Image (cartoon, rainbow, N blue to C red):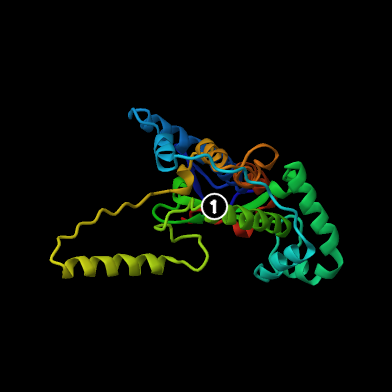
């Protein structure tokens, strides 16, 4: 199906067919992380010191093994209650609102499924699928590199993901793996705390008649540039091994496999590449 309202540049060609546009987005999002990672490794090879060298230099110790604890029905119930209540859903047509309404009837079997997933170290394939929506960040709306994927996961996968995150975060906090300068994605901390710390330390230093200098780095397409093998290596280094080599690895699989559903699930009115 073609429509003059929706266009996307593919090489030297201008595409206005819905099916082809979705396929192009699908292939792009599936390969962008791998492509950027390869380029990043190629650039890193110009240096004699591996990035892993700094990891071993920072932690001159062996971390204890991380093991996922079994969940209680109370744990799973609290996780589900903490999810934002929404009517939106993906391919399974189960919203977080429906999940919460069904909680009294599904809590026990869902807890059993979660614990079985933990004990076997298996993240179910169907939970790795997600719907991806291309979001134009800036620049030419015909250029596919200006779009970022917004991944919409199933409600059930969010439960497992949060359960893993909670335990992995506790492991990292207990062993002081996270540096004090890490403000994002941490409980009771936000970017405003980072701004306050910067301003406070700058003013204190200036009051002491000391010159202050700053270096600011903006990482463009930061999430697209993450090297998955390096993350997995770090996961192993921090103690998550064997059957419980699970948490971040399953999230990475969501990232690399999830967009396979984009072709099937993206509705005509949800894909909005360049208009012209």
- Give the residue drawn at x 74%, y 47%: 118
Q: Where is residue 153 in the image (x, y as percent from the top left)?
A: 66, 55
Say which quarter of the image contains residue 90.
bottom right
Counting the numbered discs, the total is: 1
- In the rendered view, does 156 fall on the left or right side of 145? right
Describe the element under mark 1 as helix, strand or loop. helix
Say which quarter of the image contains residue 43.
top left
Q: Position of residue 103 (x, y in %)?
A: 80, 68
The answer to whether residue 35 is above or below residue 7 is: above
The answer to whether residue 40 is above or below residue 117 is: above
- Give the residue drawn at x 40%, y 36%: 51
Q: Where is residue 36 in the image (x, y as percent from the top left)?
A: 45, 38
Task: In this rendered view, identify the residue nearer to me: 117 or 8.
Answer: 117
Local crowd size for mark 1, using a 10 Å CA cut-off: few (<14), some (14–19), many (≥20): some
* Residue that label 1 marks: 172
Task: In this rendered view, identify the residue nearer to me: 140 or 13.
Answer: 140
Q: Position of residue 141 (x, y in %)?
A: 44, 53
- In the rendered view, does 156 fall on the left or right side of 269? right
- In this view, the residue farthest toward the left is 209
Task: In this rendered view, identify the residue nearer to me: 130 or 163.
Answer: 163
Q: Can residue 6 be seen in this view?
A: no
- Give the residue drawn at x 55%, y 55%: 174
Q: Is residue 47 visible?
A: yes
The answer to whether residue 19 is above or below residue 271 is: above
Task: In this rendered view, identify the residue nearer to me: 271 or 138.
Answer: 138
The answer to whether residue 11 is above or below residue 25 is: above
- Give the residue drawn at x 46%, y 32%: 38
């Amino acid at each position: 199906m073609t429509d003059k309202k929706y266009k996307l540049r593919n090489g030297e060609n201008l595409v206005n067919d819905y099916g082809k546009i979705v396929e192009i987005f699908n292939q792009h999002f599936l390969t962008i992380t791998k492509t950027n990672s390869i380029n990043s490794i190629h650039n890193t090879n110009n240096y004699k010191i591996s990035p892993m060298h700094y990891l071993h230099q920072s932690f001159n110790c062996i971390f204890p093994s991380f093991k996922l604890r079994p969940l209680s029905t109370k744990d799973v119930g609290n996780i589900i209650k903490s999810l934002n209540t929404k009517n939106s859903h993906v391919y399974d047509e189960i919203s977080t609102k429906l999940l919460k309404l069904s909680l009294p009837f599904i809590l026990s079997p869902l807890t059993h499924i979660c614990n079985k997933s933990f004990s076997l170290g298996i993240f179910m394939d169907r939970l790795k699928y997600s719907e991806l929506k291309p979001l134009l960040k800036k620049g030419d709306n015909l250029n596919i590199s200006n779009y970022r994927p917004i991944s919409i996961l199933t409600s059930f996968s969010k439960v497992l993901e949060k359960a893993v995150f909670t335990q992995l975060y506790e492991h990292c906090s207990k062993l002081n793996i996270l540096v004090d300068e890490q403000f994002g994605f941490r409980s009771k901390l936000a970017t405003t705390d980072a701004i306050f710390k910067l301003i406070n330390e700058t003013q204190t230093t200036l009051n002491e008649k000391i010159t202050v200098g700053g270096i600011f780095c903006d990482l463009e397409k930061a999430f697209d540039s993450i090297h998955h093998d390096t993350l997995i290596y770090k996961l192993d280094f921090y103690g998550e091994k064997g059957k419980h080599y699970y948490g971040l690895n399953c999230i990475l699989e969501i990232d690399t496999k999830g967009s396979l559903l984009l072709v099937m699930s993206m509705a005509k009115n949800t894909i909005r590449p360049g208009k012209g």
